[in-house]
Each structure stands twice: as structure tokens, then as C-alpha cells.
Image: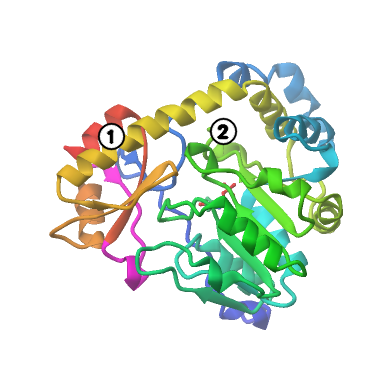
Amino acid sequence: MSRFFAERYQQMDAYVPGEQPKDMEYIKLNTNESPYPPAPSVVGAVTAERIELLRLYPDPTCGVLRAKLAGLCGYDAENIFVTNGSDDALNFIFMAYGSKGAIFPDITYGFYKVFAQLNGVFYREIPLREDFTIDPDEYMEQNRLILIANPNAPTGMSMDMGAIEDIIRSNPNSIVAIDEAYVDFGGQSCAPLVAKYDNLLVVRTYSKSRNMAGGRLGYAIGNVKLIQDLEKLKYSTNPYCINRLTMLLAEATVDADQYYLDCCKEVARTRVWTAQALTELGFKVLPSDANFLFAKAAKIGGKELYMALKVRGVLVRHFGNPRIADYVRITVGTAQQMERLLR
Ligand code: PMP
């Protein structure tokens, strides 16, 4: 760290992304990417002609893409906020709505804590119950920003929609953000509730169910006024944050929606039999609605399992938090990759 670095960032712990080692070829099951490529029509969307247009700035309003996304979820373009990966949407949400503090589970997406620190937001982590479920009662009448990943990560467990609606209803003066990064693999989306509640933001990503982690696209669905707030922050940060190529690819992705829903179904099928096979091998596997499994071996710790798999060419993710140190998070890949993992 240099002596010039702003004091408020000096103690901050940056987010640590999943490793991408290059020393050998790994089966990469550590960052919840899709094992499938984008749809063929998406691959064909970037032509030489389009590349020539890179000399011009992209449309900062992302007009075409927003209208397409809105059509998909039954809202208007004004209800959609498009960002460079959903991490950016989450950061803007902390920036916009964190002034009274934030709460989120103790075991959840590690970036929430980092965004809170980055934006000077006071935060409290609410322990998950012993069985790793979220206790909705802990989130009632809190009057501060609430973040819930549904399904949660790294557990993969979903929360009942009714319980989420109770939380939204009991916090009318603060924003409830539901992070649906993994919802398409078996969860239930809260998007329909946006029409009913002006304090709800639903955050989605193209990185998991749209096979496009490398393209960096995320979005939030919410009340028009909330979207205007977030747009104001985006226009004060980087109005052109979605590049022309990603915008094109994302538009083509909306048009090929059925292909992606089929990929999600395939991942869910693979998840079910992999969970069964791991259980038969003596693992404890949490119920998952996501594209990953959170599993604990009978005889060795999570770190040992992670390392033993790594030397055999299979990358999974291990987290240091003592409550989950016995577990590893395993992304659901292709059937072949899962067979290799099980061997
Ligand atoms: N939310 C959750 C729960 C995640 O696991 C991730 C991916 N690490 C994200 C959001 C962010 O994904 P992206 O920025 O790639 O859209």
C-alpha cells in the first residue's frame, strides 16, 4: 500500500475472486460458471461490421437491451437498470440505499461485506440458523438496507417467497434487494413482486444461467423511481459501462431465451444425480436450487478435500469462515465433469 492511499480504504479487505490457476488444465468447478457455451445465434451476433462500430461510444441508455429484458419479465424498460455484471448493480445499491446501515446473512455472497466497507455503510451480519436456513423474523422491521441472495450462496438453499414478501412488507421505509444470481436453476423469482412494492430491487446476472460470465452483464428490476436513483449513480460513475459487444451479445441472448432455459434444466438434472452420488459416498450435501452443491466429506475437512481435488485436476471452492470450513462448494458442470469429480 502506498502512503497516498485514502485512509478510509486502508483497512478494507478486497473481495478475493475464485482462483484461475494456469499451471495445468483443471476441471473448473470453483466459480459457478456455466459449462455450456452461449447459443449459436449469440456467437454469430458479433460481425466485422459491428466491430467497426467500436469506434463509437455505446448507447448509455442501453435502450434496446432494456426493452428486451423488460419484455422478458413483464415490465417496462424504465423498470430495468443494466450494469457491468451484477456486482456493479449491488455496489450501486449499497451506495444509494446504505446510509442507515445494512443487514445480510453471516454466510452469503462475500462481496456484500466488501461493498458495505467500500461505501462506508455500517453493516450487521445475521447468523443463519443451525441448518443454514435464513430466519425471516430476524429481518422484520429493520429499517435499513436488506440484502438476501435467493438461492443463497454458497449454501444453494432457497427461501420461501411468502417469507420474502413478509420481509419486504415489514420494511416499507428501506430497500430490500433480492440477489437472484442463481434463481433460474430451481428457485422462485421475486420479480412479480416489483409491481406491488416500491422498496424491492431484484438483481440478476448473465454470468450463470446466461452462460456469459466473461461478457459482464447484470441488471436490476425495480420501481421506476429506484431505477432513476441508480441511473443517476451510474451516470456519475461510468455512463458507458456496457460495451457495444456485450450489449449485442446480451440482446441476442434474450432472443435465444429457450436455449438458456434448457441449459439450466440440464444443469439442474446433473445437480440432482451428483448430489445423490455424493450422498452415497458419505457426503453431507445441502439441498440446492442453484448451479452448485455445498458438500461436506465424512472423514476429511473442507480444505483437505479442496487440496486433494486440486492435485487431481479438479478445482472447487473452499471458504475459511469457521462455520463452513468443513464444506466445499462444487459448481455443477457437465455430466462428464461430474463423473470425473466423483471418481
Ligand atoms: N451474486 C451472487 C450471489 C454471486 O455468487 C455472484 C457471482 N460471484 C454475483 C452476484 C456477481 O456476479 P456477476 O458480477 O458476475 O454478475
Considering only vertical position in the picture, is 210 above or below 149?
Answer: above
Residue 310: horizontal and vertical position, in percent?
A: 25, 49
Task: Looking at the picture, tell me which residue is in the foreground, 290 or 26.
Answer: 290
* Viewport quadrant of the C terminus: top left
**Does 85 appear above or below 321?**
above
Residue 1 visible from this viewpoint: no
Decide whether residue 257 is among the magenta residues. no
The residue located at (68%, 79%) in the rendering is: 6
Q: Residue at x 52, y 74 (%)?
A: 125
- The numbered disc on residue 273 is 1
Q: Which residue is mark 2?
A: 210
Q: Look at the image and tell me in which quarter the N terminus lies.
A: bottom right
- Crowding near the residue tagged with mark 1, few <14, some 14–19, many ≥20 C-alpha atoms within 10 Å: few
Residue range in magenta is: 312-326
As helix, strand or loop, the secondary structure at mark 1 comes to helix
Q: Upstream in the sequence, badge 2 or badge 1?
A: 2
Ligand 1 neighbours mark 2 (CB distance < 8 Å): no
Image disc number at residue 56: none
Q: Is residue 251 left or right of residue 311?
A: right
Using the image as rendered, state which of residue 239 and residue 81 is in the foreground.
Answer: 81
Residue type at the position of mark 1: Trp
- The quadrant in which residue 225 appears is bottom right
- Position of residue 268 relative to residue 111, above or below, is above
From what the image shows, is residue 268 above or below residue 121?
above
Residue type at mark 2 is Arg
Q: Nearer the viewer, mark 2 or mark 1?
A: 1
Residue drawn where x is 26% and y is 63% of the image: 326
